[in-house]
Image (spheres, grey):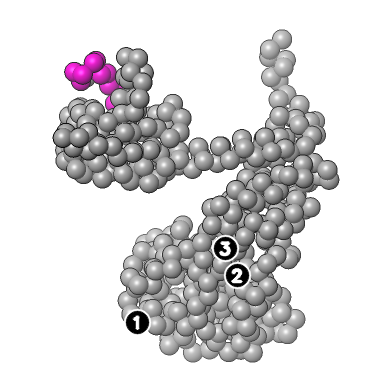
Amino acid sequence: MKNAVHSDIFGRLLKSKGLFVDREAMRPTYTPGILPHRDDEINDIASVMVPALRGETPSNILIYGKTGTGKTAVTKFVGKQLLKKGKETGKHVNFIYINCEIVDTQYRILQNIANHFINDWSERIPFTGWPTDEVYTRLIRMIDKNGGVTVIILDEVDKIKGDESLYSLSRINNDLEKAKVSIVGISNDLKFTEFLDPRVRSSLGEENMIFPPYDAGELQDILKQRVEIALKPDSIDEDVIPLCSALAAQEHGDARRALDLLRISAELAERSETPRISRRFVRLAQNKIEIDRILEVVRTLPAQSKTILLAILLQEKQNKKAGSAGAITTGEVYEVYKNLCKKTRTNSLTQRRVADLISELDMLGIITARVISKGRYGRTRDINISSSSDEIMAVLKEDDAFKELSNYKIRGQTRII
C-alpha cells in the first residue's frame, strides 16, 4: 500500500492548487517593466549613457549602495533600454553584464568579454590556458571588429582579485581604433576604491552614484507590484506586505530581503496547502532565512574557527548531559579546542587568539558571547549557540575531518578522547 502512495508523488503535488502565477517574478533577479522609487537613479545613469547613442564614449561610472537597493536592477533596466533605442536609431551598442563574485580574475573577465563577440564555439577563448596578454589582444581585436560602443557592467566589482583587470579595462580605449568602451562598476563597499591603484581610481570613477536604502513605504510599493504579477488574486492577507516591508526596512531597506521573505512565506503557505498567506508564514520564513544564512556562514568558516565552534557544541552537549544549565565559558571551550587540535595533529592557537575568533563568531551571529566579570579572577565570556545546535553540527559533519571529531567525549572536568 505504501508503494502505491509513493508511486506518483509529483502527480499528487501538481494537482494541489498553488498560490503562484509567476514564481520567478518574486525573485530579486527579476527585472519588472517599471522600477518603483528609482526614477532619479534611472535618469542619472541614462544621462551618462546617452553619448553611446551618438557614437561617443560615455563616462565610466561607479555605483554604490547597500545590498537590495536596486543597483543591479536599475543598471540592467537602463542597459535594456539602451539596446532597444540603439536598434531603433541604427546605432551599434553592446551591453555586457559580468558578476565579479563568480568571474573574479583578470583572465576570466577578459575571456568573458571577448567571448561575447565570438559566435563560433570553436574560436572561443578557453576557460584557462592562454597567456593573459594574448587574451587581451584578442579582446581588442574583437571589440574593434564589432565596432560601436560597448558598455561593460562589473557587478560586485570589489570582489575582483588584484588591480590588473580594472587597470586594463579603464585604459582599453587607448588601444582601440574603431570602437569605444564604457565601464560601470557596482559595489556594496563605499571604501573599496581606497585600496586601488591611484591611476585606476582616477580613470574608473569618472562618475560616482550612491543608491539610498528603501524605506518601509517604498518597500511596500515594490512588494505590491510583485504580488500583482506573481501571486493569484486574494491569496495574501492585507497585513503581510506591511510586515515584510517593516522587517526588511530594519535591515537597511533591503528589497531583496523583503522579496525573499514574501516569496518564502508564499512557498511555506503553498506547501501547507493553505489558501492564503498570513503573518504566521512570514514569521516562519524569517526564521528559515536566518537559519539558512547562519548555516551558509558556517560552511565558509576557516578550519580553526570550525574547530572552535565544534568545541562549543561539544561543551554545550556535555553541560546538558551533566544537568548543568547556563552558558559555556571561554576557558571550557579552550580546553576542548586544544584537545581537538591534538587529535587532528594541528597547531593550536593561543587563548587570546581563540577569544578573538569567538568574538568573530559572535559578530557573524552564530553564537552570542557576553563578557562577564569574575572579580579577581578576571573576565570571561558566557557563550550560547544562537541557532539550532543539531543543524550547525550537521553542517560541520559535511567535512569528513569534523565528522570524526564530533565523536569527541568529555567526562566531567577531565577531557579525554
Residue 323 part of the magenta segment: no
The circle on residue 213 is 3
Q: Which of 327 and 154 is in front in this view?
A: 327
* Residue for point 65% across, 40% down: 282
Of the two numbered discs 3 and 2 in the rendering, the one whose residue sits closer to the viewer: 3
Residue that carries the numbered disc 1 in the rendered image = 199
Amino acid type indicated by mark 1: Arg
The stretch in magenta equals: 403-415
| x and y, in percent, of residue 386 in the image | 43, 35
Residue that carries the numbered disc 2 in the rendered image = 75
Indicate the quadrant containing the N terminus: top left, top right, bottom left or bottom right.
top right
State whether residue 68 appears in this view.
Answer: yes
Question: In this image, 193 relative to 223: left or right?
Answer: left
* Residue for point 46% across, 75% down: 139
> Dot 2, how many residues are within 10 Å of its Cα: few (below 14), some (14-19), or many (20+)?
many
| x and y, in percent, of residue 154 in the image | 49, 68
> Dot 1, how many residues are within 10 Å of its Cα: few (below 14), some (14-19), or many (20+)?
few
Q: Nearer the viewer, residue 407 or 102?
A: 407
Q: Looking at this rendering, what residue extends furthest in the right direction? A: 233
